[in-house]
Structure formats: C-alpha cells, structure tokens
Amino acid sequence: MSSRLTRSALAAASALTVLAVAACSSSDQPSTGSGSASNAAAQPASAGKIKVVASTDVWGSVVSAVGGDKVEVKSIIHDPSADPHSYETTADDALAAKGAQLLLSNGGGYDEFFGKLTEQASSAKKLVAYDIAATGDENEHVWYDLPGVDKVADQVAAQLGELQPAAKQQFSDNATAFKAKVDALEKRLEELGAAHPGTKVVVTEPVAHYLLASAKITDATPKAFSDAVENDTDVPADAVSAYKQLIATKQVKALINNEQTVTPLTQDVVKQAKETGIGVVGVTETLPAGVADYIGWMTGEVDELAGALK
C-alpha cells in the first residue's frame, strides 16, 4: 500500500548530479540540510557521537530515544508537507549518508528515495523497520505497529552497541525504558477496545491501520474507497455515497483523518462527521509541529482516539 501526503505527480528519482557532488566531496560530516530535509535536532558534530541518518523524523526520534547523547541523528524527512514518495535527495543528504555509521529507513515501499542514499554508505550498518517489524501485513505504516516499534528499538540498541561497545548497556537500558512506554500505550489501546467492543470507524487513509488493530477496532471504510485512495485514483461515486451513509446513520464512532492528505473529498467527509457529531481523530505520518518525540506523538493520538470513542 502507498499513502500520499500530496496529490501531485512529482517524480521520485534523485538527480545523478547529487550523488556525483557527494562522491567528489572530501567532507563526511552530516549536514543539517535545508527545507524539508533539515534535521530537527541538528547540532555540530561532537567527537565520539555515532552518526545516524534516518529516512523520517519518526524513526529518527526512536534512534534518539535509544541512543541518547551518544548519537547525532539526521532525519531526511521532517517537514509534514514533504512526501516520501516524491522526495528528491539533495547533495547534503548524500553527504550525510556517506558519513553515517547507521542508516534506518521505514521500507515497505514507503521511502524508496532512501535506497539511493544507502549506496553512499557502503560500510554503514543498515536497518529497515518494515522488515524488522515483520507484521505479515502489506500496510507500510509500521511506525503505528507498536510491537514492531519495540523490535526496531531493540535492533537499534544492538547496532549502536556494536558501534560503541562501551555504551552498550546504556543503549540497552534506554531501549528498555522506551519500550516500557510503548507497551503502556499498547495496553491502553487494548483496554480501550475492550471498553468499546464492536466499535467501527471510517478512515480517509489506512495510515493508522495497526493502531486500530491493537484496539480491535473495525475499519468499516468501503473497500473501493480505500483502494482508490491508496492507488491515488478518483473514488467511485457509489463508494463515496456508502462512506457518507455510514457517517450520516452513525454506524461508526469516529472518522480517522490523515491530516497530511487534504483533498476536497477529505474536507467534505470531515465536515460531515463534525456536523453529525462523529468524532474526528487526526493522525499524521511524521511528527507534528511542536512534538519532538515518538511517545509524546503517539500518546496524543491515543488520547484523541479515546476521546472520540466516549
């Protein structure tokens, strides 16, 4: 499955000159980048810090939680308006990848641009979240798969420990503390589902698929609606009608809306849900403005879901 943060048909290929510039440069210091490629936590390189490049700030925040002050993390995508499907890498991105010791991507077809960057880091350790989570599901939004995020944290700790053995225990302890918070969210979702058995919702995109699955909440979105959204094609009129009927008759408790995909149709159904008294839960694919860590982000979304189901 592939989500879209924008609906433009931008090319996803990176210019060859970008890689050429990186190959010719003598610098191996990760750059903070510019525009959507800048690093939210960019700091001057410090001696002894492990250089990590993540495809998005979601995974960059997980690395920061596990690595603490021992890592220097650059997240390529951190701007909510940037689309991983159409992002074109820059010379700064390539230079950062060339100097990285660990690379972490989402995988599953979500951030294919990152493959070009891994070619610049032949000696770096590489982790792919989608492969680590191994959900058996085609949905690529695995940062919403909380047990899968636990697995990624463990793998990050293991790889960082190999790169800096003296801090191995610290990385392990950090991962354990991080996973305890993730597990608490998973338990809360399970309790939320148990308190609202048989709950159905509709979604504008199946971004939070795994979050709903944890709560055993049914996504009642008509298949033709979801298929059209995922394939970036027009939603059939009968599917739109069926979707709106679910809202109008209050057969669903909430509408889960990907706030980073705004179309006339999503605006229309969100407006209808609010007017009908159906809760609207906003979800995103990168960290929202003002939110710096994974746990804070996920806690906010679970809080919003809980509120909508009351």
Image (tube, rainbow, N blue to C red):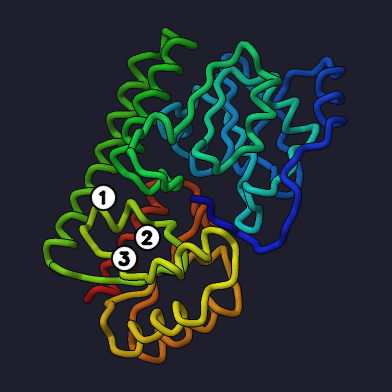
Q: Residues within 10 Å of mark 2 (few under 14, many from 20)?
A: some
Q: Residue at x 64, y 30 (%)?
A: 115
Residue where numbered disc 3 is placed: 219
Q: Earlier in the sequence, mark 1 or mark 2?
A: 1
Q: Are marks 1 and 2 in contact (CB under 8 Å)?
A: no
In which quarter of the view is residue 197 placed? bottom left
| Secondary structure at numbered mark 1 | helix
Image coordinates for residue 119, horizontal then vertical, percent: 68, 21
Image coordinates for residue 249, horizontal then vertical, percent: 29, 89
Residue 286 drawn above or below residue 250:
above
Task: Please state if 150 lies on the left or on the right of 82 as rendered.
Answer: left
| Secondary structure at numbered mark 3 | strand
Residue 300: assigned label: 2
Q: CA distance from mark 3 to mark 2?
A: 20 Å
| Secondary structure at numbered mark 2 | helix
Which of the two discs, 1 and 3, sits closer to the camera? 3
Amino acid at circle 1: Leu
Task: Please state if 21 lies on the left or on the right of 130 as rendered.
Answer: right
Q: CA distance from mark 1 to mark 2?
A: 11 Å
